[in-house]
Amino acid sequence: MAGGFLLEIRRGTQSALLVIREAGLPSSAVDVSVAADCLEVRRGESREAAALPAEVRLVPASCRGLLRLPGEGLHLRMRLRRPPPSADLIFTLRESLKPQKNYVFSCQSCGDVIVKDRKFLRVLPLPSENWSALVEEWCCHPDPFARSTLYPQHDDCFLGDTFFLLNSGNESHVPESPMCCSETGHHASQTGPNLKSKENTRVICKRCKTMLGETVSSDTIKYYVTEVTIRPSERSFSPTPRSQFVQSMVAQILVELSSAKSTFRFTVTGDNGKIYILMWLLNSDTLLVESLGSSSSHSVFTLFGDIFMPSSGPVGTWSAVKVLYQPCIKSRNKDIADAWENDIGVHPLKFPSETCMELLLILGLSTASLPPSLRYLNSFQEAGLPQLNAGIGVLGDFEGKRLPEFSPFITVPTVGHMVWS
């Protein structure tokens, strides 16, 4: 299909929005046919079709809301015959990190080993970032935790929402490849009680100079989950494209927090304390199906970014988390950012400042890939964050091949005689 299409499916409601991009709709009269398992565009004697993934089956008779928007293409809504399988999130730090097992920690950007063959006796979740601010609501006497710190002991791993804490006093290092260093060039565990500035606490990869985390005490290091990969010692390192990793990790965090705490609004804050993004979780049950169309459209950014390459086939599927967001860089949206910062119903997410900028760029590209009519909701921009485990299906292209039988078959009546100009 020359211009390709976008099919946005909601699992919960078994509904779908189909957008056939305008490049695929010639200027002369065209018939668009919707079958249960494929789409077809016919013009005279020529016809182009694309198959849908096996888990997606449409109800053609439910087509409604037919609309053609200049510069976008044809929009119509329909129902699904059955709900697609639920998305299984394969990366859950609390579930995948187990005591009494050996793990290797690596820099996500370059693969350099940070911690080798580390075995934990305890893997424990930390309370939320602002737990101490609520102590006054819990206690009728002076704060009993005022002088207490939640730092891991030897062979402990403490898990936060966007980070984990390790004790640096008993680490295994790769020979001739130290774990990391601070901005001053010293080993992170040596900066301990003499930390004088925020810059001195930054823990960076010695190979690629990416910020991995920060030191929080003389023997405790905080690593951000967006900067480090964790694997069992028996497995080898498998690189993941940076933008794909960041998207999937943020999507995972949003789904976990919304499920556990009924929190749907988030501030994305850098390690410098500045708010970069306001995010509002719209839904987490979206399945996106996208066709790249002809090879001439491969240079156009798609919803899948660097994940969805032409070699993946003409149609790709991806489970996604849909979000609304507002950028807050250069004092943009300062009033609403200040209001959200002081709202107890908004959950803060802290990442390295560089990662916040990466995420903002990813969201912007995702928004730009959507049809213009779907990019905004009130004052917020809309974007999708694909989840890591959902595979990209390689489906056959029916161009030049025998087409399957259409059953049931429906030709959208108002399209058959419409002249596109």
Image (tube, grey):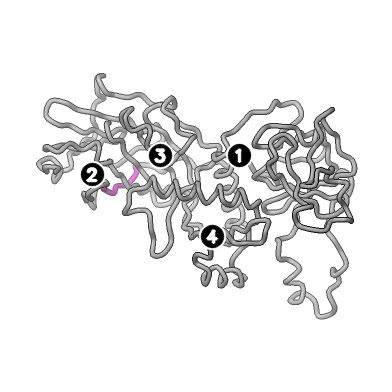
The residue positioned 81% from the left and 46% from the top of the image is: 166
Q: Which circle, 4 or 3, is nearer the viewer?
A: 4
Q: Of the numbered discs in the image, which one, if any, rests on residue 329?
A: 4
Badge 3 crowding class, 10 Å Cα cut-off, few under 14, some 14 to 19, many 20 or more, is some
x 70%, y 40%: residue: 209
What is the C-alpha distance between the residues marked 2 and 3? 32 Å
Report helix, strand or loop for mark 4.
helix
Task: Give the magenta range.
Answer: 73-80
Task: Provide the major secondary structure of the magenta segment.
Answer: strand
> Outermost residue toward the top?
401
The quarter of the image holding the N terminus is: top left
User: Horizontal and vertical percent for residue 107?
Assistant: 70, 37
Q: Quadrant of residue 404?
A: top left
* Residue, disc 2: 61
Query: Nearer the viewer's eye, disc 2 or disc 1?
Result: 1
Whichever of labels 2 and 3 marks the residue nearer the N terminus, that label is 2
**Which badge, 2 or 1, is on the more N-terminal residue?**
2
* Residue 90, disc: 1
Q: Residue furthest bottom?
A: 140
Question: Could you tell me the amino acid type at mark 3?
Answer: Phe
Q: Quadrant of residue 395?
A: top left
User: In 3D space, how far apart are the residues under numbered discs 4 and 3 (Cα atoms)?
Assistant: 24 Å
Q: CA distance from mark 2 to mark 1?
A: 36 Å
SS under mark 2:
strand
